[in-house]
């Protein structure tokens, strides 16, 4: 993989027909600016916004979301990027506000389909580079065209858009707001932000620059709205330092683990700082944590001595009281390092009785609450003392500004229109109510669902068309999404188990009496022999019925033969009934429509089992040549 033009801001101009004042007077003036909230307005995560003007498209952020407990076996959810793929020839650039997974995590899936230039800061570049090194993404983004965009650097012109970054505060360093100059006016894109006058690794938000934009006139402000239901102003991230120090002090001589999201470099800084003050080393556990720390250290964000950090493997040689683990898995992800510790399956870490486990994530995204709860339960049952933000108020400082921060920004920018982003439907409504209290017209706030759009022309805005979107679920190493049918199957398997019917055949002849049924996760077979036998009868009857006859002791062979002869003449699938020793055997041949027999068995056996047990296992019919 090679990055192109990383430090050469001057080479960035890749536009054909860049924006200029002249554009306002040429025939293109009737063109509209369209903003599509592709994703991120309903579920907080998987943020992605599209800007479109004439033939030019740019996008801001490209993040993953987290599956809810119903999406079995799904690792991540990504935005439906079909529109960008279909319009790849017009898609000129992807701009990244900050390095959180829900803003950059879906980039490999985008690059697989479109090789678009990416603009972002060094930390973003580092995180993306690490991710693309993973085996599952091999070959993707080998020729990634990454361009540096910083809050202190020059503006970048891409097609009709001229973009510059400005400083905001958040829980990952170097987060930016974007000022997007368009032919119809200035748009400020402020994804996750808060106002922090004493940030841990950053300078404070650049309110002067934001005010300057406000002075010149802003057409639309896209603003974080996650904190729109929380009163007050942001607490500084710095206020956490003493919290960790106090917690670690209380847990002297005990094993300590802290879990947080891997890209929260400021948090990792504070945990490390507190650990070193207590003369403990920091043991990093989990691939994502490892990667983030490596990238951040390479860029000078974690200025601690080299020997401050060790691997969890090295940690086995230390006394536990001399360590603080920073461990992945704060959203309860199955298979994460902390999940394996909780199950007693981690090869390098053994959870000690009386261990202190601290959850220090930002507020959980919707859908993961149950998994977090389950993980905390497991840790507690194994003797750990689990501390999380609900029982200890000051355990996390949100990276998202509450009401006070949001109204400050709205008042300084004074845009003509608003689009709340990065929240949920409820948060967007709360944001609308909040700014309307400042005197802005409620109708100037567009609460958009995913795929909805706003069109701007002549200084006015109205709702545009909505894109039809699919849910794209990603499972394991697969880069292709999996469909809703797969999820439905998994759900059925997990709740009601599976019932397999094996139908032996020889030379196309069904050996009716040798049918086997096998079940897992449905009923306890030993106690349900009778049900199993009766289900075999049901299957036998289905096969007989599809013959057009009841082939059993009650029916005469001649009658059968006669009927079957008729059927054969009528071109039925049934071609033969074997007569052996004068008796009718139950072996039957279906000329070609095994699919119909299979379907019928699946349906009828399913119905029978539901009637008998009230449960709905997945019925799988397997024809087997013997
Ligand atoms: Zn964020």
Image (cartoon, rainbow, N blue to C red):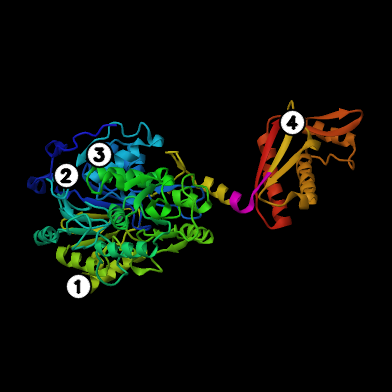
In this rendered view, identify the residue nearer to me: 483 or 145: 145
**Disc 3 to disc 4, C-alpha distance:** 56 Å
Q: Which residues are magenta?
A: 492-499
Is 423 above or below relative to 560?
below
Mark 1 residue CB less than 8 A from any atom of ligand 1: no
| Disc 2 residue crowd, few under 14, some 14–19, many 20+, Cα 10 Å | many
| Disc 3 residue crowd, few under 14, some 14–19, many 20+, Cα 10 Å | some
| Disc 4 residue crowd, few under 14, some 14–19, many 20+, Cα 10 Å | some
In this rendered view, identify the residue nearer to me: 129 or 280: 280
Estimate the x, y position of residue 486 in percent, counting from the top left. 53, 45
Q: Quadrant of the C terminus?
A: top right
Mark 2 lies on residue: 160
Whether residue 493 is in magenta: the answer is yes
**Disc 1 to disc 2, C-alpha distance:** 32 Å
Is 413 positioned to the left or the right of 422 in the image?
left
* 4 vs 2, front mark: 4
Is 609 positioned to the left or the right of 72 in the image?
right
Estimate the x, y position of residue 561 in percent, counting from the top left. 85, 32
What residue appears at the point 70 percent right and 38 percent down from the top-left corner?
Answer: 597
- Can you tell which mark lies on residue 505? 4
Mark 1 lies on residue: 439
Query: Which type of secondary structure does the marked residue at label 3 adopt?
Result: helix
**Disc 1 to disc 3, C-alpha distance:** 39 Å
Give whichever of discs 4 and 2 has the lower sequence position: 2
Main SS class of the magenta portion in the image:
helix
Which of the 4 quarters of the picture holds residue 452? bottom left
| Disc 1 residue crowd, few under 14, some 14–19, many 20+, Cα 10 Å | few
């Amino acid at each position: 993989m090679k990055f192109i033009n990383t430090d050469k801001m001057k080479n960035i101009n890749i536009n054909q027909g860049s924006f200029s004042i002249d554009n306002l007077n040429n025939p293109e003036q009737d063109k509209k600016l369209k903003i599509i909230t592709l994703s991120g307005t309903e579920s907080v995560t998987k943020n992605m916004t599209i800007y479109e003007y004439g033939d030019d498209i740019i996008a801001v952020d490209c993040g993953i979301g987290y599956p809810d407990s119903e999406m079995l076996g799904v690792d991540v959810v990504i935005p439906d990027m079909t529109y960008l793929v279909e319009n790849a020839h017009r898609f000129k650039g992807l701009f990244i506000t900050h390095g959180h997974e829900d803003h950059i995590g879906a980039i490999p899936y985008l690059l697989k389909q479109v090789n678009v230039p990416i603009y972002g800061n060094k930390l973003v570049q580092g995180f993306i580079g690490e991710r693309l090194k993973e085996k599952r993404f091999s070959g993707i983004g080998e020729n990634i065209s990454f361009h540096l965009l910083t809050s202190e650097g020059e503006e970048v012109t891409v097609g009709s858009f001229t973009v510059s970054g400005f400083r905001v505060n958040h829980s990952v360093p170097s987060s930016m707001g974007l000022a997007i100059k368009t032919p119809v006016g200035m748009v400020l894109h402020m994804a996750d932000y808060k106002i922090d006058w004493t940030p841990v690794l950053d300078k404070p938000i650049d309110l002067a620059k934001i005010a300057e934009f406000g002075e010149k006139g802003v057409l639309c402000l896209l603003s974080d709205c996650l904190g729109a239901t929380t009163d007050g102003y942001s607490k500084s991230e710095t206020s956490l330092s003493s919290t960790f120090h106090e917690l670690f002090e209380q847990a002297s001589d005990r094993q300590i683990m802290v879990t947080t999201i891997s890209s929260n470099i400021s948090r990792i800084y504070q945990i490390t700082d507190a650990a070193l003050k207590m003369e403990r080393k920091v043991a990093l556990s989990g691939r994502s944590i490892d990667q983030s720390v490596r990238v951040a250290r390479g860029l000078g964000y974690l200025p601690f001595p080299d020997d401050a950090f060790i691997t969890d493997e090295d940690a086995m040689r230390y006394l536990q009281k001399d360590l603080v683990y920073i461990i992945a898995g704060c959203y309860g992800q199955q298979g994460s390092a902390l999940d394996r510790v909780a199950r007693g399956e981690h090869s390098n870490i053994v959870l000690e009785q009386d261990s202190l486990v601290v959850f220090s994530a930002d507020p959980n995204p919707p859908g993961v609450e149950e998994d977090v709860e389950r993980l905390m339960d497991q840790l507690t049952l194994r003797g750990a003392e689990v501390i999380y933000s609900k029982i200890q108020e000051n355990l996390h400082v949100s990276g998202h500004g509450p009401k006070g921060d949001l109204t400050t920004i709205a008042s300084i920018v004074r845009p003509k229109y608003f689009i709340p982003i990065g929240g949920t439907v409820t948060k967007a409504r709360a944001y609308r109510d909040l700014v309307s209290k400042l005197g802005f017209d409620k109708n100037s706030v567009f609460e958009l669902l995913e795929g909805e759009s706003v069109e701007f022309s002549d200084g006015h805005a109205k709702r545009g068309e909505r894109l039809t979107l699919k849910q794209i679920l990603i499972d394991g190493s697969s880069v292709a999404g999996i469909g809703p049918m797969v999820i439905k199957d998994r759900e059925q398997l997990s709740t009601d188990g599976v019932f397999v019917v094996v139908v032996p055949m020889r030379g196309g002849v069904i050996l009716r009496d040798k049918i086997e049924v096998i079940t897992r996760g449905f009923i306890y077979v030993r106690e349900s022999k009778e049900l199993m036998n009766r289900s075999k009868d049901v299957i036998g009857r289905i096969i007989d019925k599809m013959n057009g006859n009841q082939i059993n002791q009650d029916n005469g062979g001649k009658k059968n033969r006669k009927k079957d002869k008729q059927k054969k003449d009528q071109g039925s699938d049934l071609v033969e009934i074997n007569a052996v020793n004068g008796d009718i055997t139950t072996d039957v041949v279906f000329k070609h429509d095994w699919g119909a027999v299979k379907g019928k068995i699946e349906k009828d056996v399913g119905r029978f089992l539901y009637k008998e047990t009230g449960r709905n296992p997945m019925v799988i019919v397997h024809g087997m040549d013997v």
